[in-house]
Amino acid sequence: MVMPFFALFTVFGLFPLLYTLWVSLHDWQLINGDEGFVALDNYFELFGDPKFYNALGNTLTLLLLATVPQIVLALGIAALLDRPLRAKTFWRSAVLLPNVVSVAAVALVFGQLFGRDFGVVNWLLGLVGAPRLDWHAQGWSAQAAIALIVVWRWAGYNALLYLAAMQSVPAELYEAAELDGASRLRQFFSVTLPAIRPTILFTAIVSAIGGMQLFVEPQLFDTNGVAGTGGDDRQFQTIVMYLYEKGFGQFDAGYAAAIAWVVFLVCAALAAACVVLARRLPGRS
């Protein structure tokens, strides 16, 4: 019964992973193909490449800016939806709406909202006397705008996962906490959060992996027209954008494959760190 899964995983998961490792050990050009075995030369060149470290730093910054607020906001939304509300189905559907909208449409709309000359955000800043910002030109402003796109898209999705977990918490725990005089806020931190810790861990791991693979949002947010560069000064170029630039802009498949394997190893390290951190946090076993 499980053989179809393993067959599909081998063809579409394991084989591409191992083949990418093989390509990363070669001087492999998309146009000319394999031009010879170079062992770890692509990795040595990569770890001496300042553009790689710039892209990795941007990616980790975006990951933190998007993941932490996303999880906090999702927990708040889930807590509100878990209370008695009118039109529950409507509100639960509404929070999922940003996730089902095309990411290309979302990125293009946010790109217009953060436009320098006619953007709504700069217009609002002007109303309060704040100076207009060129959101695309500076690293911190562009990364903040891109992180806002990610938070807007995924907070509602995670909120529904948290809501499902909250509704599975035994009511007896809340009754016991209430008898002990715990406030609603104390019940949330002492009962709800420890009970839904596995769900929080799952969303943290998935969000971290998604953050390391961030591509569409910054790519469509870029207005300079050069694919994969992430701004004129690479101020918001992510590691996957750099992979795209090397692989499909400069046709260096071997170097791009090395980047892909580094992304895979960083994702594995982040997932392991999330698991270790979750085990150290207080909560129910």
Image (spheres, rainbow, N blue to C red):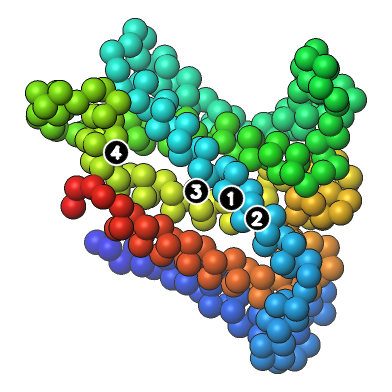
Which residue is identified by label 1?
A: 63
Instruction: Report if the CB atoms under discs 3 and 1 are less than 8 Å apart.
Output: yes
Report, in whole angstroms, how far the alpha carbon at label 4 lies from the one at label 1: 22 Å
**Would residue 47 appear left or right of 159 to someone viewing this image?**
right
Secondary structure type for disc 2: helix
Report, in whole angstroms, how far the alpha carbon at label 2 lies from the one at label 1: 6 Å
The answer to whether residue 53 is seen in the rendering is yes
What residue type is disc 4 on? Leu
Image spot of residue 41 (x, y percent): 72, 87
Instruction: Report if the CB atoms under discs 2 and 1 are less than 8 Å apart.
Output: yes
Image spot of residue 217 (x, y percent): 68, 42
**Would residue 137 appear left or right of 152 to someone viewing this image?**
right
Question: Closer to the observer: label 4 or label 3?
Answer: 4
Secondary structure type for disc 3: helix
Secondary structure type for disc 4: helix
Could you tell me which residue is drawn at 71 percent across and 44 percent down? 143
What residue type is disc 3 on? Ser
What residue type is disc 1 on? Leu
Which residue is identified by label 3?
A: 207
What residue type is disc 2 on? Thr
Mark 2 neighbour density, 10 Å: few (under 14) some (14–19) many (20 or more): many
Looking at the image, residue 208 lies above or below residue 247: above
The answer to whether residue 34 is seen in the rendering is no
Residue 32 figure quarter: bottom right
Q: Residue furthest top?
A: 86
Residue 187 figure quarter: top left
Report, in whole angstroms, how far the alpha carbon at label 4 lies from the one at label 3: 18 Å
Secondary structure type for disc 1: helix
Which residue is identified by label 4?
A: 193
Which residue is identified by label 2?
A: 59
Name which of mark 4 and mark 1 comes first in the sequence.
Answer: 1
Image spot of residue 38 (x, y percent): 72, 91
